[in-house]
Image: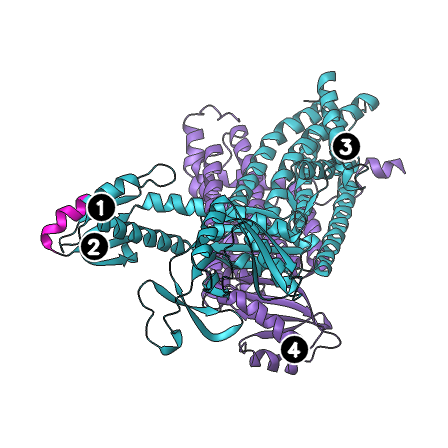
Chain colours: A purple, B cyan
Amino acid sequence: MMQMFLHPILRLVPDNTKIRFMRGRFLGLMVSAVLSTSSIVLFFYPGLNLGIDFKGGVVIQAETPGTADFSHLRAALAAAGLGGAGLQRLGSPDKVMISLEAQRTDAATDAAVQRIGTALQKAAPGTRILGTSAIGASVSAELFQKGLLALGLSLLMILVYIWFRFEWEFAVGAVVTLILDMTKAIGFLVITRIQFDLVMVAAILTILGYSTNDKVVVYDRVRENLRKYKSLPLRELIDLSINETLSRTVGTSTTVFLAALPLALFGGASLSGFAWVMLFGIVVGTSSSIFIAAPILLFLGEHRLRQDARAAPRPAKSRG
Amino acid sequence: MMFFTRAKMALIFGICALGILLSVPNLVSAPAPWMPWRHLRLGLDLQGGSYLLLQMDIDSVVHEQLGNTLDSVRTTLLHAGTGYHSLALDPAHDRVLVTPREPADLDAVQAALAKMAAGEVAPGGAPELSVSALPTGQVAVTLSRPALEARAAAAIQQSIEIVRRRLDGTGVVDPQIAQEGAARIMVQLPGISDPNRIKQLLGRTAHLTFHLIDQTVNPASGGPPPPGDEFLPVQGAPGQRLAVFQRVDVDGANLTDAEAGQDPQTGQWVVNFTFDSVGAQEFGDITRANVGRPFAIVLDNQVISAPVIREPILGGRGQISGNFTAQSATDLALLLRAGALPAPLTVVEQQTVGPELGADAIRAGTISLAVGFVLVIVFMGAFYGLFGWLANIALVMNLIILMALLSVLQATLTLPGMAGILLTLGMAVDANILINERIREETRLGQRPLAAMETGFKRAYGTIIDSNATTLLAHVMLFIFGTGPVRGFAITITLGIVSTLFTATLFARLLMARWYVAIRPAALPV
C-alpha cells in the first residue's frame, strides 16, 4: 500500500528518448505557416464574433412565466421600436436572451435597456430580468483599444525579458512563435464563433504566458547544453535538449490541460469559451515549442551560437 | 539547498500557519463584529448586483464656464463704460468674442478685459483667461486649457461626492464609488438587481433655482422670449410653458435640509426645505418685495411649482408642492439634500447580475475548481509518487495562501478569477514537475540521493523564475488595461505566482528535506 504512494505508478514518457525532432522542422514550419495564414484570412473574412465588450450593445437575460412565446415577444419588441433586437433561447424554455446592437449615442443605449424591460413586461407580465449588460459604443471602442494594447505590450515585455535573459536569437524565436500561436488562436475563435471579448483577451494572454513558459524551459536547456557540449552540432544539441525536457513538457501540458478541462465542461456559458481557447492554446503552445521555436533558433543560431563556441570557448554567461 | 536552519524552518512554517489563520475566516461567519475578520470579497458577477459607469459631460462644464465668462465680460465693459457692438460665444475655440462699437475703442476694451482677467484664477492657481486682439478687430477672451482641465477635475471630484451622498440616502449597503479615467465615475451596488431607481437618481442634475415670473409675457403667443426672460416647460402639464426671468433669485445651493412630508391640510406629498442664513436672507427679501406675485420653483430647467407669494417668508423655511407621490417627494428631498451635480452624468456602461445568475456562477466555478484540483492531485500522485504527494501538500498550501492573500488584500474574486485560481494550480505544479524531472535525471546519471535533490533544485530554480516572470509580466499588463471581472483574473494569477514561488519551491523543498532527514533513504523513489 505504501509502495503505491511512494513510487510513481505511471510514466508519461520513457527515459532517454532520442526522437530527432529537427528532422521534422520543415514540415512543422509548413503546417504552422498554412494554419496561421488561413487564420489571418479568417480574421478578415468572416472575422471575429465580437462580444458586447468590444462592439457595444445590450444583452438582457430574462425569465418569462411559463414557456416563452417568441413570436409574441418579437412583436412586442418591434412595437416598442426595437425591431433590430435578437431573441435566443437560454437553456430552459422559459429563459430568453435579448440582444441589441449599440445605439447611436450612449444615452440611447442606456434608454434601450429600459425600453426592452417595459416591452417584456407588456408582452409577458411577470417576466423577471435575470441579468443585464449594456455598453455604449464609446466605451466599447475604448475597451477594444485597451485589449489590443494589453496584448501588444505583453508581447513586447516578453520579448525584452527573454532578450535580457538569453541571446537575441532566443527572443526572436520565442516572439515569432508566440505571434504564430496567437494567430492560430484567433483562427480557432473565428471557426468556433466563440465571442471575442475581454475574457478572451485574458485567455489569449494566458496562452501566451503558458507558451512562453514552455519555450523558456526548452531554451534554458539549450543554453545549458551549449556550455556542456562544446562541439556538438546545434541541430543535435537542440534535439537532445528537447528530448531531455520532453517528460516535463508533457507533464506540465497535461496538468494545465486537466485544470482547464473542467472549466470547459462545467464552467457555464461565460467560462466554457475561455476554457476551450485555453485547451486549444495548450496543445498549440506545447507543439510550437518543439516544431517552431526550436527550428527558428536552429536557423538563426546555426552559425552564430556554435561558431562562437568553437572559435574561442567564451566564458559561460552566468545565470542570475 | 537541502539544509534549513532552525530559524528558516520556523519562518516557513510560520508563513504557512499565518496563511491558514487568515484563510479560515472564509469557512465560517464572523464570531464578533469587532474582530478583524476578513472574508473574500466577491465580485458582482458572483454575489449579484449592479455596476454602473457614468460619464460626466465635460462639454457642459466648458459651456457653463464660457457662459460665466460672457457675463463677466458684459459686466466689466458696462462698468468700464466702453460699449460693444456684439458679444458672442465661440465654443469651438473656448472663447468669447467682443466687437467694440468703434475700432478706436479696441485698446480700451482690451485693457479693461485684461484687468478683469488678472483677477480670475482657476482652482490650482493657473491663470484662467487670456485676452488678445484679433486681426478682425475683435477682442478674444480665451479660457485656458489647463484651467478648464482643473475645472473639469474639480467637477468630477464634486460629482463623486454628490453621487456618494445620493447613494447614502438610498440605503444601498456598501456601495463602491471610484473615479475611472478623467471624466468617468464607476459605481458598484452589491445586491441591487434592479438599478433603475438609482439610475434615475444619479441621472438628474437636480439644480434647483427660484425665479420670479414675468406676468407681462404670454409664451403661448409665439415668438422668442424677450431679453432676460426664458420660457420653461411645466412639469405635469405637457405643452404648457411659463415665462420666467432668467435671473436666479435664490439658488438651491443655499439649502441646508430637505424632507419629504405630507401637507397637514390637503394630505398631499410635499418637500419641506430649509435655507442657510444667506439663502434665508435672499428668500426673505424677495418674498417681502413680491407679495401677491407668483414665483417659479425650477428644477433642471423645468418648472415644478409656481405658487403665489402670500406673505413674506422670513424664517428660511419653505415648501414645494407639485403633484408628488410619496416616492417622488422622497427622491426629490434626497436629491436636494445631496446637492446638484456640476454637470450631467450619462450611464455609458451597466452590468446587472441577478441573485440566481450569481449563484449559478458560484456553482459553476466551485465545481470546476474542485474537479480540476482533484485531477491535478491524482495526476501528480500517480506520475511522481512520493515527491508528487509532497508537491500536492504544497499545492493545498498554495490554495490556502492564495485565499489568505485575496482575503487580506480584499482583492475582488470574480468568475474569471476562479478560473485564474484553477490555472494557477495547474501551472504551480510545473515548478514541482521541473524539480522532480531534474532530480530523476540526476539520479539516472548516478548521483547519490542528497546530491541529486540538491542539484535538481538548484538547476530547476532559474527556469522556474524565468517562466513565472514572463507570465507575471503578461498579467500585470492585463491588470493595468483590463476592467471588471478580467481584472479579477489578472489579480488571482498574479497573486497565484507569488504564492506558487513560495509553496512550490521553498515549502516543497522543506518537506522533501524533512522527509530525507527522517528516512535517510538509500535510493530516491523517482
Q: Residue B511: percent from the left, percent from the top?
A: 76, 28
Front disc: 3 or 4? 4
Tell me the CA gap for discs 1 and 4.
60 Å
> Which image quadrant for residue A216?
top right
Would residue A61 appear left or right of B216 to someone viewing this image?
right
Is label 2 in a helix, a strand or a loop? strand
Crowding at dot 3, Cα within 10 Å, few <14 / some 14-19 / many 20+, comes out as: few
CB atoms of marks 2 and 4 within 8 Å: no
The amino acid at mark 2 is Val
- Tell me, for residue B98, which label it has, or none: 2
Is label 1 in a helix, a strand or a loop? helix
Confirm whether circles 1 and 3 share one chain.
yes
Front disc: 1 or 4? 1
- Which residue does the numbered mark 1 point to in the structure image? B113
Specify the subunit that label 2 lies on.
B
- Residue lying at 46% horizontally and 53% vertically, measured from the top left: B251
Residue A31 seen? no
The amino acid at mark 4 is Lys
Q: Report the magenta residues as a range.
A: B102-111
**In the image, is residue B446 above or below residue B347?**
above
Would residue A96 appear left or right of B388 to someone viewing this image?
left
- Which residue does the numbered mark 4 point to in the structure image? A122
Front disc: 2 or 4? 2
CB atoms of marks 3 and 4 within 8 Å: no
The amino acid at mark 1 is Leu
Which label's residue is closer to the chain start, 1 or 3? Answer: 3
